[in-house]
Amino acid sequence: MKERAPVYRRVMDLFKQDGRIHPGTGMMSGVIALFLAILSVLGVLAFHFPAYLTTPELRSFYSVEAMRTLLFSALLVSGSIALANTVLGRQRWLNISAFVLVCCAVAAGGSQVAVTASNAGGHPYLGLDWFILDLLASSTVFIIFEKLTPLYPGQPVFRGEWQVDMKHFLFNHLSVGAVLLCINFFIHRLFSWAAYEPLQQAIQSMPYLLELFVAVLVADLAQYAAHRIYHEVPFMWRFHAVHHSTRTLDWLAGSRLHIVELLITRVAVLGVLFVLGFSKAVLDAYIIIVGFQAVLIHSNVKLPWGWLRYIIVTPDFHHWHHSSDTEAIDKNYAAHFSFIDYLFGTAVRGVGNRLPQHYGILDNDMPGTFLAQQAYPFARKAK
C-alpha cells in the first residue's frame, strides 16, 4: 500500500500545482478555506505590528473596526467550511490544515487584537495590509467575472505559472514602503526645478472631473512614451521583457514586473503629474483608477464594450499588446485611453472577434522563477 505524504508536504505540493479544480470533490471549497485562513493569520500579524506591517498612506483610508469585521468574517467563513468538509470527509488533509490555521489566528487574538496607536514614521515597513486587501478584493471580483464572462472560456483560475506571478504580486505589495520612498526621492530630485506655480494653480482651479480627466490623459501620454521606449530601446526591453514573458493573461498576470521597470515608470508618470501640480484628491483618484485598470486590462474578461473600446483600453485591446503574433508586435501601448494608439498609428485589433493566437516573448528564454526573472536583464545580451 502506498504511504501517504505528511499533511504539511501535501499542502506545500498544492502550491506547486496548476490546472482545473473539479467541483464536487471538496477541493474548491477547501482551497477557499485555506486561502482565507492564510490571509486571516497575516491579518492578525498586521494587527499586532501595525507600525511595521501596514502602510501609513493606506491606514488613513480605512477604519480599524471595518478591518476587524472583515477579519472576523474571514475566520468565520474559513472555519465553517473547513469544519464542515472535515466532518463530511472531503479533502480532510486540506481542510484540517485550514482549520488549524484558523485556530492559530484565534489563539493569537483573532479580530480582537488591541492595536497600538503608533503612527511614528522614520522606520521601514511592509505593506502587508495592502497585500491582504488587494489580493482579497482583486481575486474575488475578477475571478468571478473571469468565470461568468471569460475572454478565453475554459481557462483555469490556477493556470500555468500562477505561482511566479503571485510572488511578483507579493513582492510588489510588501515592498511598497521602499518603492514609495525611492519614487518620492527621485521625483523631487529630478522634477522640482520644472514646477511652475501659475500653471499648477490653473490646473487646480479646474472642476474636479475635468482635472481628473486631464490627469489621467497626461499620465497615459507619459506612460505611452515610456512604454514605447521599453519596446524600441534594446537595453530597456531587457526589463520590460519580464512583463511580456507571461503566456497566459488573467487578473494576476499584470503583477509580473521587473522592479527597475516599476520604479522608472512610476517616477516618469508621477513626476509629470507632480510638476503640473494636480491636487491630492485627483492624485488619489488616479492611483485608484490606474490600480483597477491595470488589473482589468490583463484579465480574462469579455464585456460588451461597444464604441467605448475606441476610447478606453479594454482587456481584448491590451491582450493584443501581449501577443507575439507578427501583426501585434510593438502595438497598443496605451494604458488608459486606446484613442492615443489610434492617434499615433500604433493600434491593432483583430478582425471581427478574433483573438491573439500566441502570447509571450519571441525568444522564449525567460526563466521560471521570481529571482531569476529579476536577474534576467543583467544576465543576457539584448535581442
Image (tube, helix red, strand yellow):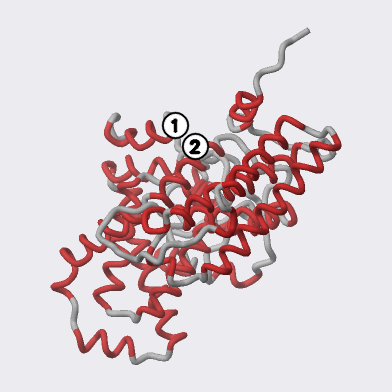
Q: From the viewer's perspective, is residue 167 above or below residue 4?
A: below
Measured in 3D between alpha carbons, the distance from the residue under mark 1 to the one under mark 2, in whole angstroms, is 6 Å
Residue 282: image quadrant is bottom left
Which residue appears at 32% of the width and 86% of the height? 203
The residue labelled by disc 1 is 369
Residue that lies at the very extreme toward the top in this rendered image: 1
Give percent across and percent down for residue 247.
54, 39
Residue that lies at the very extreme toward the left in this rendered image: 193
First-in-chain label (1 vs 2): 2
What's the amino acid at mark 2? Val
Give percent across and percent down for residue 156.
68, 41
- In the rendered image, the quadrant that contains the C terminus is top left
Residue 92 seen by the camera = yes
Secondary element under disc 1, as helix, strand or loop, is loop
Which residue appears at 29% of the width and 90% of the height? 202
- Label 2 crowd bin: few (<14), some (14–19), many (20+), radius 10 Å: some
Give percent across and percent down for residue 275.
24, 75
The residue labelled by disc 2 is 164
Q: From the viewer's perspective, is residue 148 above or below residue 329?
A: below
Which residue appears at 74% of the width and 10% of the height? 2
Residue 352 seen by the camera = no
- Label 1 crowd bin: few (<14), some (14–19), many (20+), radius 10 Å: some
Give percent across and percent down for residue 52.
37, 54
Q: Does 98 sit left or right of 127 as displayed?
A: right
Residue 188: image quadrant is bottom left
Q: From the viewer's perspective, is residue 362 above or below residue 108?
A: above
Question: Could you tell me how many numbered marks the image carries?
Answer: 2
What's the amino acid at mark 1? Thr
| Front residue (pair 306, 99) | 99
Residues under numbered marks 1 and 2 in contact, where contact means CB atoms less than 8 Å apart: yes
Which residue appears at 33% of the width and 43% of the height? 239
- In the rendered image, the quadrant that contains the N terminus is top right
